[in-house]
Amino acid sequence: MRSIKKPYSYPVRIAHALAVLFFFCLTLTGLRLAWLKEDQFSDTVIEIIDAITPTGDIYQLHLIFGILLTGTGIFYLAYVFLTGENRRLFDLFSFRQYSSVKKIIYLFSFSIGLVSLFTGYAIYSGLYIGPDGYFFNSMLHHWCFRLLAIFVILHAIETLVSKKTSVNEILFQKLKENNVNKKMVIITAIISLIAMIIAIRIINTSDDLHCKEQNRIVIVDGRANDIEWYGVDSMQVQTFGGANFKAGVTEAIIKTFHNKHKIFFLIKWADPTRSYNRFLIKNDSGWMEEVSEYKNIHGEYIYSEDRLSLFFSKDDNCAATCHIGSGDKLGLHYTSDDTADVWQWMAVSTDPAREADDRWWGGYENDIYGGQHFENKASGGYKSNFNDDWQQPYFLPINILSRNWIWYGSDSYEPYNDEADTFPVGYRIPSVLVAPTLGDRGDVIAKGKWSNGYWTVEISRNIATGSDFDLPFRGELYLGLAFFNNADISHSYHLKPIKLVIE
């Protein structure tokens, strides 16, 4: 059997060191993403992860470290093959001291590294089919990481305790001569750089949704009339991570077009239940907003309502605005300093008024709102029916309830008074007062219909409103979609950018 006398070169040693560093960074960012899903680990493990992992723009960091680790691997393989050091890869499996089990472990580690790379990209790009496809890719990705982490730890221990073995010359054998092929270093560095640039281009490549001009209008009623939407561009979008969806996944279809004055959107997504669960409940001590015992930093996901959120930005996709927090703070959405237009349709709070809440996001620094803005409202809009100061409802129903919200000014309700409060313990009344929004936040018309396990929402707005908080629909904009299934915070989302191209 052959033995290795020539020591590993500096480029090979540096590649090993960088691989360990980037894998460590990838591990920390991956664990922070796993922290978002508390059901993956025990409470103790979650607390440890929360204490040791970074916060902030973790999605982008995880992608960056994944690309850097891939580039390092390509550099290593290209260098050893171009310099002839690839014999070490073959010698590694012909040494007598390596058992068949060890050979299988090394080959297996290379395989799971590739699987982890491809499943990560599949999750990022939505290259899976439905909840089962996402669950398969997600579990495969997570278990590949666990197995790789075990391999790296055991391999490091073996390297540290077995200094006399040929494998450990990577760290311990001294170089007796200048053992660097500078020409090959430059060539392989260029190959690695090109591969990383291609990876970045692939990651940043958007799916384009073309919004073309049509000489027609849509009656915004949520009915998705075929004649109104015939021939317009559409896109299928896979989203994941939402509460109450199967495996957190729901699939959506979005359509769009514009005429000379308005832009129109149709969004249809799978939701097995129609949720109008916004109530006040009477107990022994009075009234309170109905919340579940499971409410945590992920919000309420039992007593809430269905929602849809649309995001528009000139500069970046929605995932880039997601900054993950720690402890009892899940995180915030804010931009790098530009203005993002954000619409939120809610089944209880805005749908009865045929509108979506027209919000906006900005930068975080020196911003008392933390980047998310809701103050652009003149009057009207939805409001809680619960008076926090007096711990009682603003309005009580006069007759048996027929709706899940209170239309402000309706003669079916009366202002709260002790004489009218004859309701028994356990009785529920609507917790949301609804009225049309006046001012900047009332620019977006929207109406939804739920049928046979699907929500269909039609939305329209003027091409340009003249507001500093609204983006005009011209040129190209990033578009983001998020879906809430009976939840106020935890929503499904997509990571791959979508470009809205207005033609």
Image (tube, rainbow, N blue to C red):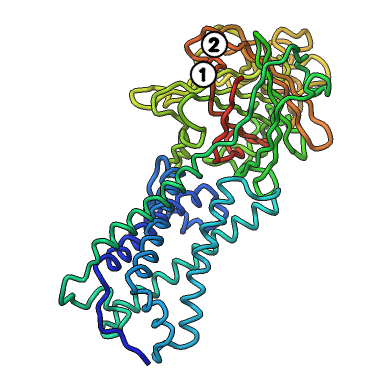
Whole-percent x and y of residue 247? 66, 50
In the picture shown, does residue 119 fall above or below 501? below
Pick the front one: 353 or 16? 16
Q: Which quadrant does the N terminus fall into?
A: bottom left
Rate crowding at label 1 as few (under 14), some (14 to 19) or many (20 or more) other CA atoms within 10 Å. Answer: few
Q: Is 434 situated above or below 187?
A: above
* Residue 311, above or below 16: above
Would you place residue 261 above or below residue 451 in this image? above
Residue 186 picture location, percent across and down = 28, 57
Q: Position of residue 469 (x, y in %)?
A: 49, 14
Q: Quadrant of the C terminus?
A: top right
Name the residue rendered at 56%, 30% in the picture: 499
Give the image quarter of residue 2.
bottom left
| Secondary structure of residue under mark 2 | loop
**Amino acid at pointer 2:** Lys
Residue carrying label 2: 377
Displayed quadrant of residue 155: bottom left
Q: Residue at x 34, y 53 (%)?
A: 190
Q: In the visual, does 298 lie left or right of 423?
A: left
Q: Which mark is residue 374?
A: 1
Q: Give the amino acid type for the residue marked by disc 1 in the picture.
A: Phe
Q: Nearer the viewer, residue 297 or 290?
A: 297
Q: Is residue 325 visible?
A: yes
Q: Are marks 2 and 1 in contact (CB under 8 Å)?
A: yes
Residue 156 percent location from the top left of the image: 34, 73
Disc 2 crowd, CA 10 A, few/some/many (<14, 14-19, 20+) = some
